Amino acid sequence: MASLVSRRSAVSTGISVPVLAILVAVGVFLVVGSLVSDIFAQQTVAGLAQGAIFASLALALVLIYRATEVINFAQGELAMATTYIAYQLTLWGLSYWLAFFLTLPIAFVLGVVLQVVFIRPVHQSIIAVVIVTVGLFILIDGLVTWKWGADLKFMKAPFGNHVYRAGGVAFARQDIGVLATSILSVILLWGLFQFTKIGLAMRAAALRPAAASLVGVRVNWMLAIGWGLAAVLGAVAGLMTEPTQFLQPTMMQPILLYAFAAAVLGGLESPAGSVIAGLMLGVFLNLVGQYVGFATSELRLPLAFAVLLVVLLFKPSGLFGRKQVRRV
Amino acid sequence: MNARFAGRLVVIAAVALVIALLPFGLTNYHQGLGARVGVYFIAILGLNILTGYTGQISIGHGAFMAIGGYTTAIMSHDHGTNLIATLPLAFAITFVCGLLVGVPALRFSGVYLALATFALAVSVPQLPLKFSKFTGGSNGIRTATAPGNSWLYGVTWACAAIGFVGAWLLLRGRTGRAFRAVRDSELAATSSGVALPIYKTLAFGISAAYAGVAGSLFVLATAGFAQPNEFGIILSLEILIGAAVAGLGSLWGVVVGAVFVGLLPEISASVPVLGSGHGQDVVFGLIVIAVMILLPNGFAGLLRLVESRFKTPIESDSTTS
C-alpha cells in the first residue's frame, strides 16, 4: 500500500541500479582517461579537489534540509564569515592550523546561535525561514564587508606550493590537501551520525520529530546542533576555498550555487548522494572546461545547472533521492 | 455589491489617488525612486500569482525580468522601436518563455522547483555575456532614448494599475479558482476537473509576463541600460522578499512589499550608525529578518488579523483566502 508508506519512513538509500551502473561507468571512464592522458589525470584530480569543496558545502545544506526541509541560503556566507574569523586569528599571530582548529568550534557556536535567535522564532512557516536565511545572507555579507572591507585578503597557504610528480603527471600538493581535508571532515561527520548517541538523537529528530521528542530527544536542540555542524562543514569548505580564490566577501557565492546543484543532484535527502554529486560536478566542470571549446568560463554556471535540469527531468528527486510518496 | 466590496474599492481608489498625485509633490530623483517601486510592484504581483495563488514557488523571476529588459533594450537599440511599444512585446515574449519553463516545471514540486527556478535566475544573466554580439556583453546595451523620471513614473504606475486590475479580474474568476484549487490540493483539483498541466503552465506564463514587463521598465529606470549584473540573483531574491513581506496569496499587501524592497535599501543607506556605506546591507538584512519574525505571513497576514478582530462571525471570507 503506497499510501501507508509516508515519505520519511523509508530508510533505504534510494540508489537504483541504473544510477549505480552510470556511476561505475563514470569511474571507469575517469580511471582509463587518466591512464591515457596526463592532462586528463591532472584535470581530474584538480576537479576532485574543487568538487570536494562543493561536496562539503552541499552536505551542510543537506544536513539542514533533512532536519527542517529548508534550504539555507546563508550557508555560503556563513562559511565565508568563518573563514574571515580564521584570517583574523592568523593576524593575531596564530599559526594556520591552530587558527583552523580554533575556527571550527567558533563556527559551531555561531551556527547554533543563529538557529536559536533567528530561525527558531519563524520555524513554522517554511517561506518565512527561507526569507530569514536570505536576510542572513545580506546581513552577514554586510557585516563582513563593514569589518574587513571588500578587497582581497591573503592567508598563508596551508599546504605549500609543492608539486608531486608521478610519471608525467603533476599533482599540486594543495589539491591533494584540499581533497583529503574535505573528505576527512565528511567522514568524521558521518561517524558522528552513525556511531554516537547524539548522532542517533539527531537522526531521530530529523526523521520523526514527534516520536523522537516522546522518547526524550530534545528536538529543538538537535536542530540547533544540526545548524552548528553545518556551519562547521561550511567553515572547512570556506577555509579550503581560500587558497585558490583568496579571501573576499563574495568568494563563496559561486561555490554555494554549485553546492546547491550538487545537493539537488544528489537528492537533497541523501548525504552520500550530495558528496558524490559534488565530486562529480567538480570533475565534470573541469574536464568540460578543458576539452570543450564552447564552454567558456561564462557558461560554467549555466552548464552546471543545465546538467541539474536534465538530471531532474529524468529523476525528479535527484540521483539518490527517494521517490516521494505522499499521503493525501 | 456588498459593503465589504465597496470598502475595498474605496481603499484601492484612495491608494491609487495617492500614487497618482504623488509625483506632483516629488523631486525628479524621488520620482525615479517611485518608478522603481512601481517596477517592484509589477514583479511582485506576478510572483504572487504564481507562488501565492497557484502554490508554485519561483526564485527565478529575475531571469524573466532580464528577458523582458533585454527585449526592450534590443528592440529600441537595433530597431528603433517606440519604448512603449516594446512593453507589450516584452509581455508576449516572456509569456511564451514562462510557458516554456512551466512545462518542465510540471515535473518538480516544492523545494526542487525552487532550486530549478533558482538555476534559471543564475543562468540567464550569464547568457548575455556569452552571446555578446546581440547583447553588448558586460557593457550592456542601451535603448535609443532614455526617458525622464516623470515619464517613467507615469508609465510604470499605469502598467502597475493595468496589471493590478488584470490580476484581480483573473484571480476572482474561474481561472483564479482553478489556481487556488491547484495550490490547496492538486489531487482535489484534478478530481474536480481542473486540468493541472494547463493551469500550472498558464500561471507560469502569466507570472513571467508580469516579470517581463517589470524588467522592461526596470531597464528604462536604469537610464535605459540593460546590463547582465543588474539582473543578478539579488534581484530575484528581492522580488521574493517583497512577495513575502507583502504576504502570499493576497493582492492587498503588494504595495507594501514593493515599497519595502524599493525604498528600504535607500533608507537603510542613510542610517548613520555603522558609519560607512557597507552599513546599508547590515540594516537591510536585519530589517528583513525582523519583519519576517514579527509578520511571518507578511502584511496581508497582518491585515487578515486586524480584519478578523472586527469581523462579524457570520461573514465568510472568500476573496483573501
Image (cartoon, coloured by chain):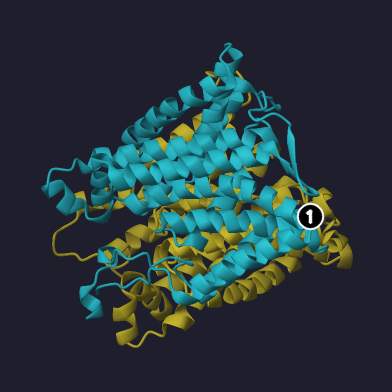
Work out whether B192 lies above or below B90: below
- Using the image, name the chain to which the residue with label 1 belongs: A
Q: Residues within 10 Å of mark 1 (few under 14, many from 20)?
A: some
Image colour for chain A is: cyan
Residue A276 placed where, x, y %?
52, 57
**Nearest to the observer: residue A88 or residue B5:** A88
* Residue name at image x 21 percent, y 51 percent: A209
Quarter in which the C terminus of chain B is drawn: bottom left
- Can residue B209 be seen here? no
**Nearest to the observer: residue A114 or residue B228:** A114
- For disc 1, the marked residue is A38
Work out whether A236 lies above or below B91: above
Q: Is residue A82 left or right of residue A289?
A: left
Chain letter, colour yellow:
B
Residue type pointed to by label 1: Asp
- Can residue A304 be seen here? yes
**Nearest to the observer: residue B153 or residue A55:** A55
Quarter in which the N terminus of chain B is drawn: bottom left
Residue B312 placed where, x, y %?
15, 58
* Residue A24, quarter of the rendered image: bottom right
Residue A11 placed where, x, y %?
29, 63
